Structures are given as C-alpha cells and as structure tokens.
Amino acid sequence: MSDTDPRLREIFEAVAQAIIAHADELTELDAAVGDGDHGHNMKRGMQAVLGELDALSAKPWNDALKAAGMQLVLKVGGASGPLYGTLFMTLGKSLDMPPTREGVAAALQTAIEAVMARGKASTGQKTMLDVLVPVSEALAAGRSPAEVAEVARKACAATKDMLATKGRASFLGERSIGHIDPGARSSLIIIEAVAAQLGDVK
C-alpha cells in the first residue's frame, strides 16, 4: 500500500457525514446527562473536516489523521474536542507507514492511552473509552470489520446501565444510569462508518 490511499477520502467523508447525520441524536443523549452540546460540537468539527477533505485526501494516512485531529481540537468545543483531537493526532503520530492491520491496532492502543491520560479516565466510568478499549482489543485480536463494529455496538449499549463517575454526567449520580453515554455513541458512529467503508458491514 502506498503512503496515499484512495480509501482515505471515502473513510473521512463517511465518518464526517455519519456524525453530522446523527448530530440531533447526540445532542439529545447529551441533554440527558450533560450540557446538551455534544451533537452540535461534533457536527461543527466534522464540517471542518469536510472542508479540508481535498487536502486531507492528498496526505498519507499519518499526516491526514494528525491534520483531522487538529481540526477537531480547533472546532469542537467542550471536552470532546481535546479528547477526539488527541485520539486522531496520536493515532497519526503512532501509525507506521505504510499502515498494516497490526500497526493500526498498536497505534490505536497508544492513542487510547493518550486519551486516558488527557481525560484522566479509564474504562467503567461511562465514557467514550468504554467503546474504544473493547474495539482496540477486538482489532488486536484480528476480528473482522463487522465483528469490531458489533463489539462497539454492544459496548455502547452497555453504557446505559453504567454509573457515570467522570465528566459532567458524574454530577447526576444514580440518575446517570439509564442513559447511553453520548461520547460512547459518537465513538460507535465513527467505528461503524469506518467498518462499513472497509467492507463486511452493511
């Protein structure tokens, strides 16, 4: 695989369009446990990514991921911008070129560790990490795109019964139970979009 990959444009566009299409849902989820701006913020960030699509698609994967992450840091407000920006930028910095499945799995693990450090969070606290970590493990285990997406769906659904102990949702205490975490949901949307572009997922 060459440094520039024809799939890159399609994957970035699919991810951005998927988040934009689910912006209202993400806002509703965040309104239940947060300040209700997750969908709007993520939409703004992904619109910025779409605006840079030509430039991004001309870059190798590692540079494109770093550039997209910077757009998210600059355009997405709240906690999501720094966290998703850290995820994308660290993924780009850690990704060996040309990318391989093993390299992507290792880079994703490094990126997740950076998100944990940035957010001072871990799994079980009702955050995006409760989707990202199982996905990373499934990818490292050699699971197919469809299987990885299914792992993400189950992990996202499981956040509904979790007690939030991190972020604004933690202020709700027991009332946070019964709501899917908006960060977990946006992570799932991104993973499903990528998996669909890689094939094997309807």
Image (cartoon, rainbow, N blue to C red):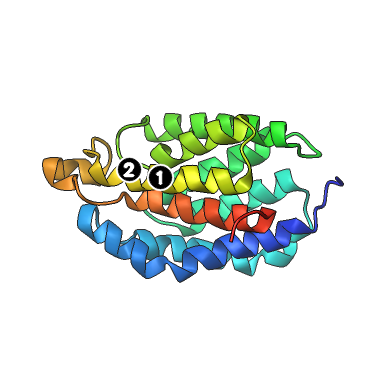
Q: Residue at x 61, y 64 (%)?
A: 14
Percent coordinates x, y for residue 172 in the rendering: 14, 45
Q: Is residue 46 above or below residue 84?
A: below
| Element assignment for label 2 | helix
Q: Are marks 2 and 1 in contact (CB under 8 Å)?
A: yes
Percent coordinates x, y for residue 65 in the rendering: 65, 48
Q: Considering depth in this image, is 64 or 185 the residue closer to the camera?
A: 185
Q: Is residue 191 above or below residue 17?
A: above
Q: From the viewer's perspective, tell me whether residue 41 is left or right of residue 37.
A: right
The disc placed on residue 154 is 1
**Any part of residue 83 in sight:** yes
Q: Residue at x 54, y 54 (%)?
A: 192
Q: Considering depth in this image, is 102 or 68 the residue closer to the camera?
A: 102
Screen quadrant of the N terminus: top right
Screen quadrant of the C terminus: bottom right
What kind of residue is marked 1? Lys
Q: Residue at x 18, y 46 (%)?
A: 176
Mark 2 vs mark 1, CA separation in Å: 6 Å
| Element assignment for label 1 | helix
Percent coordinates x, y for residue 24 in the rendering: 36, 69
What kind of residue is marked 2? Ala
Which of the 4 image quadrants contains residue 165? top left
**Any part of residue 111 in sight:** no
Q: Mark 2: few, some, or many residues within 10 Å (few <14, many ≥20)?
A: some
> Which residue is identified by label 2?
158
